[in-house]
Image (tube, rainbow, N blue to C red):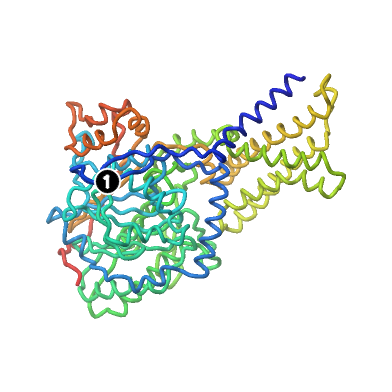
Amino acid sequence: MITFTILLIFIALGFLIPHALEIFIPKNAKQITIFRDHEQKYPYYFSPQKPVHWFDFQGLINTFRRVSLSSDILSVIDKREVQANFGKDNFNEIFDKRSHPDEYWLDFIADTGDGFDTTTSVFYHLTRSHFSKNLGVNLKPGDALVIGGDLVYPDGSDKNYGDRFKGPIRFIFPSKSRESAPYLLAVPGNHDWYDGLTAFYRMMAQQNIIGNYKTIQNRSYFAYHLGFNHHLFGLDNQLKGDLDLPQMEYFKKYIENLCKIGSTHHIILLVAEPYWYAFEAKDFKKRRQRMDSIDYFVKVMRTVINNNKAYDTEVEFDIVITGDIHHYSHYELRSPNHKTDVKHYIASGGGGAFGHVTGFLKEEIILPKLGNSTTEYIPYDLKKRYPSKEVSDKFIGYNLLFFIKNYKFTSLILFFSLIAIYIHSFTDNIAIEIISIFMVPAILTLTVVQVANPEPSDLERRHNKILYASLFIVCSVVSSIFHLNLFDTDFILPDCNPKFGLFIIQWVIPALIQAFLMGVYFYLSYRFYGLHVTEISSGKIQEGYRNFIKFKITKDEITLYVFGIKEQYQWLNLIKKNNPKDLQKQMSEETTFDENGHDTFLKKHFNNYKDNLKLIETIKIKHHETTSPTQQS
C-alpha cells in the first residue's frame, strides 16, 4: 500500500511540476531573425509560437477576463462609433489595380495567427505564384487577401500580432514592391476585439506593409468594388452581433451610389460568425438570434434600393461567408428560383487555429428570406464539409483522455483539490467542511457555464440545466466519497500511516476522477445534444485539415476554388535545423515542380509533401444577366 501511495504522489507531482515551472519560470519561444523584404535589407525579429492551449490556467483566466472586459467595453464605449471620422475610402481602389483586365482574383482565409506550423503552412500555399497542374485548374495569385476575422490568438495585442501573424507572413511572403503589392483586408473577430480593437486598428487601418501585402482600409468594416458589378461588403458585427449606426450609414451611402449606376449588382457579404448554424426558425422574431443582424442589414439595404426605384437597380446577395468556426462548410440554396435570396452560406475558418469538428452540421437548414417584411423560410442543403464527418468523428473520442491531453487543466484541479482537502482536514466548522467538499465541483460547473452558448434556444437551455446539474452532482458524489472517507479504509490502506496515506488518496484520486469527468461531460454533451462544439474540438488540438478559398470573378460568373491542406508542415523543426534567412531566400524564388507535379521546396524539406494540398470543392455562380465592368463613382 505504501507503494500505491507513493505512486499517487508521483502522479500528482507529474501533473503539477511542469505546470508550476511554466508559471514561475516562463518558457519564451526563441526569437529568430528574418527579412521584411525580398532583397533582404531590412531585418525583422519575432518568436514563432506553438498553438494556444485553451484549457491551461493562463488560457482559462485570460479567456474569462477578456470576454468580460470586451463586453463591458462594448456596452460603455463602442470604438466603431468614432470611425465615421476616419479617412475617406476609395471604393474602387482594389479593382483599379487588378492584374488581369477580364477577371479579378481574390483570396480568402479566416482564423489564422495561432500556431506557427499551421499558420505558415496555410500562408505558404496561399501565396505561391504558381500552383501544381495536378490540381486540375488554372489558378492565379490573388489581387487581394481578405481575412474573415480572428487574425491572432488568444487575443489582439501588438506582440501577438507580431509573433503569430506578421512573422509568418513576412517569413513566407516578404515585401517585393509597395506599388504592386496585393491588398490585405480584414474584419475583426472576437479575439481581435478583446482589447477593444486597439491593436487591430494600429495594424490594419494605417496603410501598412505586412509581408508583400498592403493594408488600405480605414475602418474595421469596408465595402469595395471588385469589378463587373461585383462588390465585397465586410461587416463588423462581432461579440453581440449588432451593427452600429455609423456603420449602417456607411453601407447605405454605398448602396445609394450603386442605385445611381443602375443595373444588377452582386454582393459577397462577409460577416462575423456562421449565425445560420444555430438559427431556429420557430424562434425567429421571438428571441434574439444573431442571424437577426444579417436580416436587419439586408432589410435596410433593400429599403434604400426601394427608395431609389427610378434608377432600376437590383442587388443580389450571392454569397454570405464567414470564419469563426475552424472548418469548411457550404450550404446551397435548394431552389434557384428565389432570385434575391442568398444562394450560398459558407464558413471557411481553416486559416491555422485548432480544427473544429463537423459532425454536428445538419444536412438541411431552414433560414429566413432575408430582408423580407413577412416571415418566409427557405431550405438550404449541405453540399460540402471539410474534414468529412467520418474523419471528424474520430477526434471526439480523444476527450475521454481529456485529463491527460490537457494535463495543465488537471494540474489546476489537483491544486484546488489540495486546497479543499487541506481545509477539510484542519477545520471543525461544518459549514467550511461542506464548502470544501463542493469547491472543485463548483469550479468545474462554473467553467462549463462560462464557455456555453450565451444565446441558447429554449431546448438548449433545458439541456444545459440538466447537464450542468449532472456534472455538479456526479463530481460532488466523488468529492463526498473521498472527503468523508466513505470507503473501507482497512482495505485501501493496510499497514500504512492512516493520516498521511488518507490525505494523499483524498487529494489525488478525486482530482483525477473529476478531471476525467470533465472530458466525459464534453463528450456526452456533444455526442447526444450537439453542445460544446468548441470545447470538444479544442480539448485535443487538431492541427490538420486547414483550408482557404480563391475567388475568380468575371462579368458572367463567380467561381470559388476551395482548397484543403490535410496535414501541417513542421516549420518549427525546420527553422531549428536551418537558418531562417536562408529558407526565406529559397521560398522567395519562383515556385518549381518536379516531374510528378510536387513542389520542390516542400519535397526537399518535408516528408508529407505528396498531395497534401487538394481542391475539395468548386462553386460556380452564373449570372442570368451579363453586366459590364461598371466602376462605382
- SS at badge 1: strand
Question: Where does the C terminus fall, quadrant-wise?
Answer: bottom left
The front one of 310 and 200 is 200
Question: Where does the N terminus fall, quadrant-wise?
Answer: top right
Estimate how packed mark 1 is, as few (under 14), some (14 to 19) or many (20 or more) residues with alpha carbons within 10 Å: some
Residue 597: give x, y in percent of width and height. Answer: 20, 30
Q: Is residue 432 above or below residue 223?
A: above
> Left or right of 484: which side holds 53?
left
Residue 509: give x, y in percent of width and height. Answer: 71, 31
Residue 511: give x, y in percent of width and height. Answer: 69, 36
Name the residue tied to disc 1: 561
Q: Quadrant of residue 319?
A: bottom left
Q: Is residue 585 above or below residue 343?
A: above
> Left or right of 492: which side holds 172?
left
The front one of 67 and 106 is 67
Q: Quadrant of residue 129?
A: top left
Q: Residue at x 54, y 44 (%)?
A: 535
Q: Residue at x 44, y 47 (%)?
A: 363
The front one of 206 and 360 is 206
Amino acid at pointer 1:
Tyr
> Left or right of 516: which side holds 191?
left
Residue 340: give x, y in percent of width and height. Answer: 32, 65
Q: Residue at x 62, y 37 (%)?
A: 410
